[in-house]
Amino acid sequence: MSLPPLVEPAAELTVDEIRRYSRHLIIPDVGMDGQKRLKNAKVLVVGAGGLGSPALLYLAAAGVGTLGIVDFDEVDESNLQRQIIHGVSDVGRPKAESAAASIAEVNPLVNVVVHNTALDRDNVKEIFSEYDLIVDGTDNFATRYMVNDAAVLLGKPYVWGSIYRFDGQASVFWSEHGPCYRCLYPEPPPPGMVPSCAEGGVLGVLCASIGSIQVNEAIKLLTGIGEPLVGRLMVYDALEMEYRKIKVRKDPNCVLCGENPTVTDLLEDYEDFCGAISEEAQEATLDATITARELKEWQDSGKDVFLVDVREPAEYEIVSIPGATLIPKGDILSGQALSRFPQDRQIVLHCKSGVRSAEALAALKNAGFKDAVHVQGGIVSWVNTVDPSLPSY
């Protein structure tokens, strides 16, 4: 459905702006009026990562007058495969500042507001209230639900995107005119069921595909042209080169935007709501967690350790802890690999960061391996505290 323009047009365009945006101005649907609306718009991009990179660059190039960037992370070498707003010289630099510098090179006429902070329940409403539209480029469920809830409570529309390996999704959530994110996903997936991009990977160029869709939707909303993806989910399969749209209806029983909402303010703890790890895994790790340095001390002392890497084969090929045996988490949870675990040796599990190994530890303890432990922080901690010469990812 067509929607009215989200913002009023600016008073005028300067001569420099007319020159810069001339290819927009000669499109009848955009024209002078549409470009003035873009100039007057204030858009916040949450995350200057895979999706935020192309989104910020194209929003800036399109002439959005004020661009906000919220990100607390620093640029890492592993980001450069897909986060094209950053370069080699930016490694170690705050992402929000790096992104702002790149935007200035693309379009110095844009006013960039840097929020070099972690978005949380204490600041999200205050930050969102300064903008007309939110573009969500987050990569974790806790922040996605918080972004959605804050947008609904403030009456703000937001453009959402998600990527994983070769698959992408995008939609526009605006409770005033259609569903919110909770209408599509009322509950977060069980802990460990959906791996993150850091665990499963993402094709770098997929970020551009979905990020450009998000910008396209943002421009349509701001200028009032076309039919935004309100009430529709765009699903993209890069391997099959196939786009399809799925209708998403507003849920009258939605706890946030339904007829009788029960969620009337931000949750106290979104991490707890989404559950990074299951309660069973949390219980299993009590008094069964060691550090990477402790593992190294055990190895150096000659302790008889059966070290198991529960990541996937592709991750194991990138980097591994010396002496580790690869047994993927899925094989442990299914029971298929339980016969490979000895009863007379100290079992130590590790993954990339400690989440998957905690889930695997719970399965082992349920199977009778009561003395098994896992490594807090996984191989990331091993690289950071034991052997920095190893690559990280």
Image (cartoon, rainbow, N blue to C red):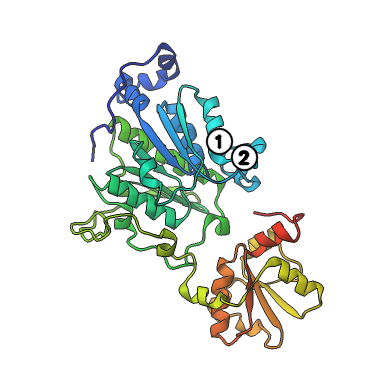
**As displayed, is residue 303 above or below residue 43?**
below
Looking at this view, is 61 or 210 the one in front? 61
Quarter location, residue 125: top left
Mark 1 burial class by Cα count in 10 Å: few <14, some 14-19, many 20+: many
Write down the residue under mark 1. Answer: 97
Where does the image place residue 179, in percent across and percent down from the top left?
Answer: 27, 51
Residue in the foreground of this view, choosing between 152 and 51: 152
Residue 371: which numbered mark, if any?
Answer: none
Residue 69, position as x, y percentages in the image: 47, 38
Label 2 Cα crowd, 10 Å radius (few <14 / some 14-19 / many 20+): some
Left or right of residue 164: residue 216: left
* Residue 361 screen position, x and y as percent: 58, 76
Q: Residue at x 78, y 79 (%)?
A: 303
Query: Residues at badges 2 and 1 in contact (C-beta under 8 Å)?
Result: yes
Residue of label 2: 93
Q: Quadrant of the image for the C terminus?
A: bottom right
Position of 11 with respect to 369 (left or right) is left
> What residue is at 31 percent from the left and 42 percent from the top?
157
Determine whether 166 is above or below 334 in the image.
above
Residue 264 point in image, percent of width and height: 26, 56
Quadrant showing the N terminus: top left
